[in-house]
Amino acid sequence: MVSALSGVASDYFRPTATSSSKTTLTRADALPDVPTTTDSGPNRHRIAISELKPLIATPVSAADNPELRDMMASNWLRMQNVPDPETVVPDNAPQNTYATVKVNGKVVATLYNGGVSMMTNDAAAAVSELEDPPGLSGPNLAQWRADKYAQLLGGTVEKASTAITQSQWTPRESRSTSYSREQLDAAFQAMLAEGQRATARSSSSYQPPQSAQGRQTDLSA
């Protein structure tokens, strides 16, 4: 009887599973491995401080640079020849009017003694293909333009009381932008002298602040 029971029990017997040791994971174990720094990492461009060399700035004098010297001298000469804007009368000033061109009683173009003209947009479009004859300037050019404008626009010319003749007209002085070697050298020396005078005036007008040392305070009052 006992043997029968033992046989039945053996049919349903399950072996006990071998218990393995349980591993406990920490936060550090969950983090990925840190790659080892190699030459391809961020430190590959690092330069040792001992390899750095100080930068030494070498001052350059304009007198030793011919191109810079001539450029400064040319600019200085041009500045010396610039007229005072308050004394210059523009070509299209009212006192320089030579004539007007009227169409149906309306002024469509104004001519000036120097030959320049001002007109409405419609008038300008109508005479856009008109070419000035070579050699004309001043009042002669103004008269030729006035006659042609009136002819093309179907208007009339009215000469202004401020109109002058060709012999009375004085062309504007042309200003040369090219200078000789002597002019450039003289201008550069004059520019240096002017700078030295300005520096001397600035130094002479400068008063250093009075130091507190040597001041005496009267405490008897």
Image: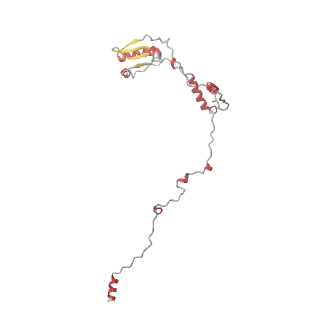
Residue 204 in the image, given as x and y percentages of width and height: 64, 26
How is the model colour-coded? Answer: secondary structure
Quick one: quadrant of the N terminus? Answer: bottom left
Q: In which quarter of the image is residue 77?
A: top right
Q: Can residue 77 be seen in this view?
A: yes
Q: Residue at x 60, y 29 (%)?
A: 70
Q: Is residue 93 left or right of residue 209?
A: left
Residue 179 in the image, given as x and y percentages of width and height: 59, 25
Whether residue 52 is situated above or below residue 7 in the rendered picture:
above
Whether residue 79 is situated above or below residue 28 in the rendered picture:
above
Q: Is residue 181 visible?
A: no
Question: Which sits in the foreground, 34 or 183?
Answer: 34
Q: Residue at x 60, y 27 (%)?
A: 73
**How many labels, in total?**
0
Whether residue 68 is situated above or below residue 51 in the rendered picture:
above
Q: Is residue 9 left or right of residue 59?
A: left
Residue 133 in the image, given as x and y percentages of width and height: 44, 19
Q: Is residue 63 left or right of residue 155?
A: right
Quick one: quadrant of the C terminus? Answer: top right
Residue 148 in the image, given as x and y percentages of width and height: 39, 16
- Toward the right, the furthest residue is 214
- Toward the top, the furthest residue is 161
- Toward the front, the furthest residue is 220
